[in-house]
Image (tube, helix red, strand yellow):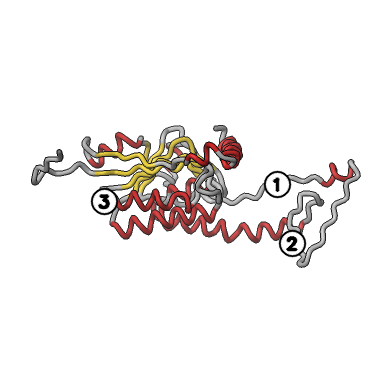
């Protein structure tokens, strides 16, 4: 039996959205972060009439588009509902992970958190010598000279590198614009922040990439009181993900996730 006591003030509700892992375009049944999978979670958090929303971030980055979509969804709902958003970085918020952190109104880090990597990367492998050594002939027929761009079975070509750099530049500029729009005057003047370097904890704070060193629970309690109700919200893997062949996709995504974290020694 529920007994309502009039005029009793309810404790503030703060959903805590966990943004853990590499950012990609996988399905909702696979590991990782993407807008399609997170949309219901983020929408639900802002429907709870929260006093604030917290983001617990631990991501080495990934897809620029998915990073942009997720961050834009958070900002759109925050502005529609008039709800402040606080980001708390755990091990790393690098590249797309930092893009997500900038969706918050403030960013808090641990002394050992890694932040930054404001850049764009294309990585691959080349096997032309291996193929030649084993007498393997590569036969490629295309309609359009750029269709075989950066083919790993052909020697690297300067025109391919120039084309890839031309593709990367507008993405990099969009990333820079997002950081400047969100962090604005907090960024250290004269510092070279956009060359894909990373910084640790207090270094990031001094450069204006973060607002201070603080952990999620004590910081939120300090802001909203000891009675604030923190509601964890994370992605859940369905039964099909664990019992069917799609679990293999999740396993492969986990391998890729680990490789992405390994770039930062994690």
Tell me the quarter of the image containing the N terminus.
top left
Q: Position of residue 8 (x, y in %)?
A: 11, 43
> Residue beneath label 3, please?
49
Q: Earlier in the sequence, mark 1 or mark 3?
A: 3
Mark 3–mark 2 contact, CB under 8 Å? no
**Upstream in sequence: badge 3 or badge 2:** 3
Q: Which residue lies furthest to the right in this view?
A: 135
Q: Where is residue 143 in the image (x, y as percent from the top left)?
A: 77, 67
Left or right: 155 as drawn, with respect to 35: right
Asked which secondary structure carries label 2, the reply is loop
Tell me the residue at 88%/46% (across/down).
136
Note whether 236 is above or below 49 in the view shown: above
Q: Is residue 211 visible?
A: no
135 on left or right of 153: right
Going 62% across and 57% down the picture, which residue do you hit?
A: 168
Residue to which mark 2 is pinned: 147
Number of callouts: 3
Q: How far apart are marks 3 and 2 (CA)?
A: 50 Å
State the residue lying farthest toward the left: 6
Mark 1 and mark 3 residues within 8 Å of each other at the beta carbon:
no
Q: Give the numbered dot on residue 124.
A: 1
Q: Let me know if residue 171 appears in the view.
A: yes
How far apart are the alpha carbons under marks 1 and 2? 16 Å
């Amino acid at each position: 039996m529920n007994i309502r006591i009039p005029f009793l003030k309810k404790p503030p509700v703060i959903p805590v959205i966990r943004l853990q892992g590499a950012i990609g375009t996988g399905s909702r049944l696979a590991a990782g972060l993407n807008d399609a999978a997170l949309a219901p979670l983020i929408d639900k958090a802002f429907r709870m009439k929260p006093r604030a929303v917290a983001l617990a971030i631990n991501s080495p980055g990934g897809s620029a588009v998915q990073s942009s979509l997720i961050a834009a969804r958070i900002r759109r709902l925050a502005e529609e509902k008039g709800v402040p958003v606080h980001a708390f970085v755990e091990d790393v918020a690098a590249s797309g992970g930092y893009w997500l952190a900038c969706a918050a109104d403030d960013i808090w880090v641990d002394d050992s958190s890694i932040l930054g990597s404001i850049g764009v990367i294309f990585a691959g492998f080349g096997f032309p010598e291996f193929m030649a050594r084993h007498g393997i002939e590569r036969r490629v027929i295309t309609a359009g000279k750029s269709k075989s761009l950066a083919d790993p079975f052909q020697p690297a070509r300067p025109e391919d590198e120039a084309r890839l750099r031309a593709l990367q530049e507008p993405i990099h500029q969009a990333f820079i614009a997002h950081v400047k729009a969100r962090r604005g005057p907090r960024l250290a003047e004269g510092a070279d922040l956009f060359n894909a370097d990373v910084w640790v904890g207090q270094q990031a704070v001094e450069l204006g990439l973060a607002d201070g060193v603080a952990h999620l629970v004590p910081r939120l309690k300090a802001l909203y009181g000891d009675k604030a109700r923190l509601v964890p919200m994370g992605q859940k893997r369905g039964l099909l993900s664990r019992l069917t062949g799609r679990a293999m996709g999740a396993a492969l995504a986990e391998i890729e996730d680990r490789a992405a974290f390994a770039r930062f020694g994690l």
